Image (cartoon, coloured by chain):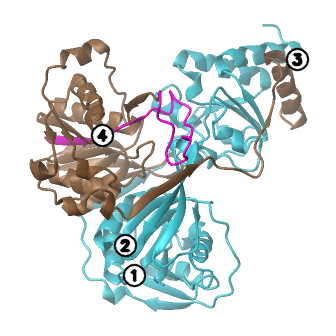
Chain colours: A brown, B cyan
Amino acid sequence: MEILVCARRVPDTSENEITLNAEGNDIERDELVYSVNEADNYAVEEALRIRDRFGGTVTVVTVGGEEDEEVLRRQLAMGANQAALLSDDGFSGSDGRGIATILKGFVQKGHYDLILTGVQAEDGAAQVGGMLAAMLDYPFASLVNSISVENDKLIVSREIEGGNKEINEIELPCVLAIQTGINEPRYVGMRGIRQVASVPIPTLGASDLGVNPATVGAQVAKVKRIDYFVPTLDSGAEMLHGSREENAEKIIELVAAKGGLK
Amino acid sequence: MPRIFAYIQHKNGVVDESAPDLLAAARKIDANTLPTAIFTGFGADLDTACSSVKSLYSEIWKVGNEVLNHPNAELVRQALVAILPRGSILLLPHDHFGIDLSPGLSVKLNAAFVPDVLAIGPIEGESLSLVRQEYGGQVSVHVRCDASLGAVISVRPGAFKAEASAATGVIVDKSSEVGVLTARRRYIETIVAEAGDVDITKHNVLVSVGRGIQEKDNIVFAEELAEVLGAAVSCSRPVVDAKWMEKSRQVGSSGKTVKPKVYLACGISGAFQHLAGVKGSPFIIAINKNPKAPIFQVADVGIVDDILEFLPELIRKVRESRGIAA
């Protein structure tokens, strides 16, 4: 099975406090720790597992700049067969539709049976996978938390409310948006990444991909971020500023007062 | 002014909670709007569902088709593309079905797409101003959307407060406008979650742990605290994703809905999917080392501390106060 995984490099919310920049038009990006978007990492792992059982190749792709190459390198170290960076000055400012248009260009240069994305990026909108599928006229399923291969079809489970699962049969080729927790992604150390340091990663621009520059980028984006702000709420928590010991005592009091301790 | 539609979900004849919320969202776009509700489905359940929103929506479009009996996003998309006038604004809830349906629908309608919206301003010409969140709710962002070719907007469940309406809805049967619907994805069955060893929905006090617990071996702190408090241990999604606790312990929209009296959120950031599972207005105590964690916005009491330091101290103090030997 030929599998394509679309992944992204994002600020890691488990490693960073996200704050606003001085202008309020973006988050503060100085000294941010970036990593592979969590759901995308699960998607790569799932692709590798399917390939290892049924044969074929795994290709990873990202839309971005030079700095995004590190996520591709990491995925090669996980075991992906090849990677490509889709980069062009004209791509910047693309909305979800623009990103899906760029990815469609890449998909149509190859022959993929299965295309995986993460269900949502940290700063994203859970949109690119579904848009890409619609543009390609491929079937799509989101929130996928298990995949089994049955000849030329897949049986996929989707996460629905209350921890329940919706089981669907889906024809290939298709696009699946992978939910976190579907597997246990393998660990990649610095050594593994060094071992793939010399693997070439081609950079492809609009003309390489056959993407009409008039269909991507900021000028055609229908959805644009204007400014960022920190949500103000009616009433936040009463913050306890005592010593650790005092705070612990206060909590015991509160739990008892609210009917917790019997 | 584009025409506004609301896609209403329903199950066994009962409409989704979002039905009045979508009306409220439509009125944020245009206070005088009379949005049209759209239902897809089949048989008596569909009719019951349509009739039940007559007091909310003045016009209700019904698409009945046997293949729409179980909602399949690919089929529903084809039905909506067939009946929606181009340039319309379509509102729907950002839930597991909306996530499946809306991105592809926006492509097929050639409309703009803005998902998981928390607030909407009045439409200015053909431009919409909306509020979304990023990074698990740590920051909010104003988004501008060009709706000149229409827009698909999914709204966060519960973000728009239902408003009263005195409509006397008319049901319009649009079934014949939809041709043959075919999909390359087929629904097989729904598997109900397995019950776990502990039923977290039945406890008055929950010690709930999130990503801040850092590793599986540290879960023992939460277990120890729960034991001395007579509480149960629950968790947020990252803990289940990492396979540190069973799915049956997960609180949230994709896990259990709990109604404790006291909820101790330990190292939980407070993403809305998690908070959606905490009902009944419990007293929420949040401990998190990130002072910007969204959980502090909804908690009653907050402590900025590392739970791996704080929990052992709390356990020691509870033991002391209750005369339990270590």
Residue bearing mark 2: B68
Labels 2 and 4 within one chain = no
Q: Distance between the residues labelled 2 and 4?
A: 33 Å
**Marks 4 & 3 on one chain:** no
Query: Which residue position is annotated with label 1?
Result: B64
Decide: is B73 above or below B195.
below
Please give the name of the residue rendered at 53% of the width and 28% of the height, measured from the top-left corner. B245
Q: From the viewer's side, name the closer residue of A66 and B196.
A: A66
Q: What stretch is highlighted in magenta?
A: A2-31
From the top left corner, tell me how far across and down residue B242 is, in percent: 46, 28
Question: How far separated are the C-alphas under marks 3 and 1?
Answer: 62 Å
Number of the label disc, if any, that sits on residue B322: 3
What is the secondary structure assignment of the residue under circle 1? strand
Q: Distance between the residues labelled 2 and 3?
A: 58 Å
Q: Position of residue A245 (x, y in %)?
A: 82, 16
N-terminal of the two: label 2 or label 3? 2
According to the image, label 4 marks what residue? A7
- Tag 2 and tag 3, C-beta contact below 8 Å: no
Name the front one of labels 1 and 4.
4
Specify the subunit that label 3 lies on.
B
Q: Nearer the viewer, residue B189 or A254?
A: A254
